[in-house]
Amino acid sequence: MASGGTGNAGAQFANLVSTFSERLKPLGANVGKQLTHWQQYAKERMGSTQDVTELPAEYRELEEKVDKIRLLHENLLKIARNYTLPHYDYQPALKDTVFDFASTVQDRATSLAATGAKAAGVQTTLASGPPGKREEIAPSLTHAFARAAYQSVEALGTQEPLGAALKKFSAVEEKVGNARLKMDAEANAKFVQPFTTTLNQTIGHAMKARRNVQSIRLTYDACRAKLKSAKPEHVEAARIEMEAAEDEFVAAVDDAMGKMKVVVESPEPLKNLADLVAAQLAYFKVSFRDSELVQIPISDGDRDEPMSSRAFQEAYEVLAEISPEIDELQVTNEALLRHPTS
């Protein structure tokens, strides 16, 4: 009985060792592959080998184009992300900022999209509300001006010219501020978000595929070098290994080229740019229109002059000129992508 139990235990142990060894084989093969990969990388870095597989010319051209498009997205997003920041066009007083952070953390977490919807459909509250209730930090420079002017109107009244002018100034600044918030929301939804998605996903997938090509290329070149130096009895095994690596390399190159073409041929960047210009154009159009409605008497009393309207007009006219040109280029680009020239 004891002998039988010992035999069973020995068989179980042998089976356990065999199973463990089988599980280690893939790990050992992977470690060996990684070692070969890094040995080839070290040789190339030190210049001890000149036999490096050259990637196709079309592949290299796609790499260059993708790098330029990636840099374009990174550079524009560094700036456009300001559309997602609260009151990015002015610096609130430090005491207001600290008080606001301490008392309205939840409110400050409200999304920009909600803020834009509020600007588009609901009038922004300036200094109204129950006495003693502290308003949140104004979301823009013009809202801050509107609030300060309105508070002064309450103190001065509108019987004097200064009070009347401040009331008009407050009204137009609020409207311009609301238009600014709407522009921010549209810029975020139609430019920042899709540009970020393109950078992280479409371009990101292409970059990952390129890194995979470089990794597999190192393994392939290491296998080719191994075949060249193999002893006669090992040539057949080395050839099989090299051919398998070659097939993997070709497949990786094809995959990377396909993903890079998706980046290069995408109409989205130009479409997103057109949407950004449209959002800015709408903002300056509203700002110019509203600022023209406010006539404030100047010192000589002989004539009235629209406040800030000239600056808004100039910005609007420049954007109005370029907007249809960008739209036309977008149409041309999409036509070229559908029917590329040979």
Image (spheres, rainbow, N blue to C red):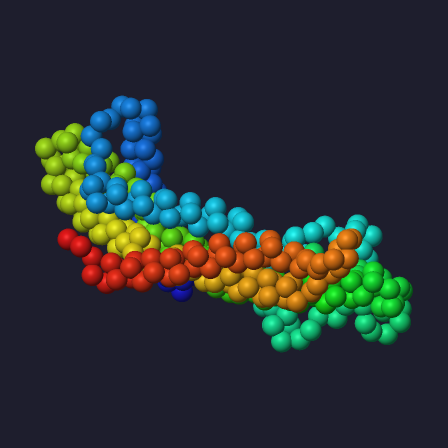
Name the spot of residue 252 as percent of width and height, x first: 25, 50
Measuring 32% from the left and 33% from the top, which residue is drawn there?
41
Name the spot of residue 294 as percent of width and height, x first: 69, 65
Name the spot of residue 218 as percent of width and height, x first: 27, 38
| The N terminus sits in image quarter | bottom left
Measuring 83% from the left and 62% from the top, which residue is drawn there?
161
Q: Is residue 37 left or right of residue 110?
A: left
Q: Is residue 8 left or right of residue 298?
A: left
The answer to whether residue 86 shows anywhere in this view is no
The image quadrant that residue 31 belongs to is: top left
The answer to whether residue 334 shows anywhere in this view is yes
Foreground: 223 or 80? 80
Q: How many marks?
A: 0
Foreground: 231 or 159? 159
Q: Which residue is the extreme one toward the front?
A: 302
The image quadrant that residue 122 belongs to is: bottom right
Q: Which residue is the extreme one toward the bottom?
A: 121
The image quadrant that residue 54 belongs to is: top left
Foreground: 288 or 92? 288
Measuring 64% from the left and 72% from the top, which residue is drawn there?
118
Name the spot of residue 304 as percent of width and height, x first: 70, 60
Measuring 34% from the left and 52% from the top, which residue is drawn there?
206
